[in-house]
Image (cartoon, rainbow, N blue to C red):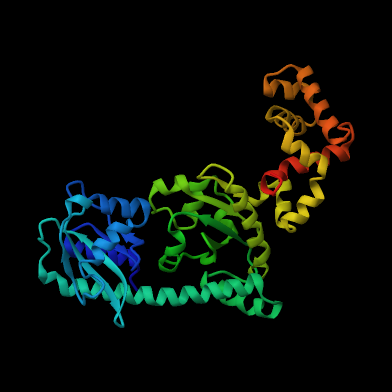
Amino acid sequence: MSSLDDLVEDMARLTDAPCTLEDPAFRLIGFSDHRGDDVVDSIRQRSILQRRSTDEVRAWFRGQGIEDSQGPLRTPADPDLGIVARLCVPARHLDRVHGYFWLIDPDGTIPESTWPEAVRIAESAARLLNVAERRQSHRDALFRELVEGGRLAARESAADLAQAGGLDLQEPVTCVLLERPELLDQVASRPSRPGVVWVRSSPGAACAVVRAELVEPTAGLTDLLGALGLGRRVDSLDRVTRAGTGPTIAGIDALAAAHRGARVSLRVARTAAPGTVVRWEALGPLALLGVTRDDDLEAAVIDPPVRALLAGAGPDVLETVRVWLDEAGSASRTAARLAVHRQTVYHRLGQVEQATGYDLARGADRLRLHLALELAPYLSAG
């Protein structure tokens, strides 16, 4: 069976025109390549780069009658909006529009003799989109049962979800959570890839249940996206994508643990620069963010004197104690990293001891302070 990407390419070849496929809300599903001499307007560029059109452009195209059209129709140019003339082929199935094929056609030269075949391609795409949405809804439900349901429900759901991704029940898997523009809306229409099952797990983030060996050797975001089958997407999106990976688990029936870990990793990634991948294995004490509720964790690791320190100390004092703790209490290495005198380091550490009542010569006090400094940015005290 042809994939949606194949059908986009078939439509482009049939009409000899740059083609995009969008869902009914004008969110991008797929696009063809275009030649150097093809006319490409800002609307196609924005659709590819930003994954959807503006409200004004969507309203303009709807005003051309595309929602009611039973077959291909030409839409005119609008220089004020930067719109080039197009041929629109609605993707209909059972009298419901599942998407639109857009063919750039500035001179109206796509022959009507191609329209019957274009309709057949669009109908195939609509059937695929209909099946994909129903299949995706089922996978989403299986995932929810697996991470939220009881043990008996999880056992049956694990088998069904594993089958969907070509996974063995007892092979190592993990979860990858991605925040990426429009990816959540595209999950249902994504082509399947052995070892990867996409689910809609939470608002704003798409989740890949993935064979661990596919993602363990990846070095960064580009490698990770390639392993998940997103390598064909637009590179500019990588600069706004954030990703978090969970721990590797022995089998898909323990997926709840991998998902919890991935949520913590993504939570930490949200505080970092776009394009960041945060892995569970690198979280260190930040993994505690997934152990209990924030208010309970805050009460356990941030006592009132430390809370006062975090609220009132200068940035230089807090940075000095963080570096000193990272450098295993070495004043000389701390001074070198901060480019200050060792006496400055001692003076600032003295301010910390005075403010907190901690004795930084004691390991237990250093541990409590280090945990508070690490976790505070992710809790209400931070």
Front in this rendered view, residue 352 or 271? 352
- Position of 81 with respect to 245 (left or right) is left
Locate residue 282, reporting x and y percent: 66, 46
Rendered residue at 61%/77% (across/down): 157
The image quadrant that residue 307 belongs to is top right
Locate residue 133, reporting x and y percent: 43, 74
Front in this rendered view, residue 248 or 103? 103
Front in this rendered view, residue 312 or 148? 312
Q: With respect to residue 82, does 339 lie above or below?
A: above
Rendered residue at 9%/61% (across/down): 109
Locate residue 370, reporting x and y percent: 78, 39
- Position of 285 with respect to 157 (left or right) is right
The image quadrant that residue 23 belongs to is bottom left
Q: With respect to residue 339, does 261 lie above or below?
A: below
Front in this rendered view, residue 247 or 167? 247
Locate residue 372, reporting x and y percent: 76, 43
Number of numbered discs: 0
Residue extending farthest to the bottom is: 94
